[in-house]
Image: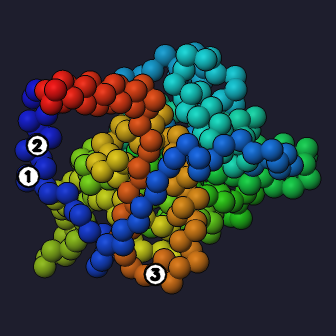
Amino acid sequence: MKRTLIILAFSVVYPTPTICYHKIIKKKLIVSYANRLRPRSQTHPSPPPVTIWVHGTRFIRRPMHETFFEGATRLRLAKYAPEEYYLRTIAQTLSKNDPLRFPFGTFYLFGWSGKLRATTREDAAKHLYNDLRNLTTAYKKRYQEKPIIRIITHSHGGTVALNLAKVQTSPAPFHIKELILLACPVQKNTRGYIADPLFEKLYALCSSLDVVQLIAPQIISNIYRTKKGHLRSKMEWPPFSNRCFPGNPKLTQVKIKMNGRALFHHEFNTKPFVKVLPRIITTINSWENEQWCNENGAYLLCVYTPKPKRLLRKQLAHRMHNSSRVNTRIR
């Protein structure tokens, strides 16, 4: 209860920005059983693309970090994770709904401590960079070419991925074809990395109900010199994050609604959203052929998904019951 009151008080004192740029461009995506991306009869591309999922901040260390990742910051294939682990379910869901883009055999999970510290996220980025370099070397030996790498992140996992631009060596032995940032806090120290050549294409998906994205702290001290020549530092206030990145031709920023409602922070990490994420990315890519895509606009994508069959049967039974009651009254 106290936590809810704190969040409500924060939303009044520090209102959620609704417009990133000077206008809103609204689009609709209806995901039906007929047009949902399903496994195709085509063969998987060879060599297969590589997908990496990076989780966000974790205030309580999960058992998976101690067992599957052995307490280390590292990459591991999702297919080796136990069935009961949720991150394996995320990987299977993405692969099932778009097996050509996210093949399960080359789907990796990146585990890190998840501590809410900028230094921890930067250190995790160093481990991720080294693992990607080793992965690229092994991939080139097997397929004689560099891998196509896609990174999907949730929350501060996006900050870890953006820090790859900071810790990279020059030139980097790989590049990221697509970086998908789900509910990533936009912070002053990392927002400029979206322009780095390491990233070919970026997607930033957010929601107007995601308060957690905004309250992620960032300590920024401005150093200035007084009239007497002394150096002083002053912390910027409020020490919170933003929702929108600066405009860049490589970046597409989209606010998401599902079935008429904006999403909360944790919902970007749930199976119902992950199930439609491939359709969302495909839809966003189709916008590149339209003239307004590169304009400074905040794009709002309204996603509508089919209701579960169980709910549909319940609604149908309720309607039949009501109609029978009406017929009885007429008689």
Mark 2 touches mark 1? (CB < 8 Å) = yes
Please, what is the three-letter code of the amino acid marked with disc 3? Trp
Which mark identifies residue 292? 3
Tell me where residue 212 sits by quadrant: top left
Q: Circle 3 sits in a helix, a strand or a loop, which is it?
A: helix
Mark 1 touches mark 3? (CB < 8 Å) = no
Name the outermost residue toward the front: 331
Q: Nearer the viewer, residue 328 or 47?
A: 328
The residue depicted at 80 percent of the width and 44 percent of the height is 41
Please, what is the three-letter code of the amino acid marked with disc 1? Val
Residue 272 to residue 284: above or below: above
Please, what is the three-letter code of the amino acid marked with disc 2? Leu
Measured from the top left, where is residue 229 in percent x and y? 19, 75
Which mark identifies residue 183? none
Residue 302 to residue 268: above or below: below
Q: Report the side of 200 relative to 39 (left or right).
A: left
The residues bearing labels 2 and 1 have C-alpha atoms spaced at a distance of 7 Å
**Neighbour class for label 2 at 10 Å: few (<14), some, many (≥20)?**
few
Which mark identifies residue 8? 2
Residue 202 to residue 320: above or below: below
Measured from the top left, where is residue 24 in percent x and y? 31, 72
Residue 13 to residue 288: above or below: above
Measured from the top left, where is residue 287 in percent x and y? 53, 71
Whichever of labels 2 and 3 marks the residue nearer the N terminus, that label is 2
Viewer can see residue 141: yes
Which mark identifies residue 12? 1
Q: Circle 2 sits in a helix, a strand or a loop, which is it?
A: helix
Q: Nearer the viewer, mark 2 or mark 3?
A: 3
Q: Circle 1 sits in a helix, a strand or a loop, which is it?
A: helix
Tell me where residue 1 sits by quadrant: top left
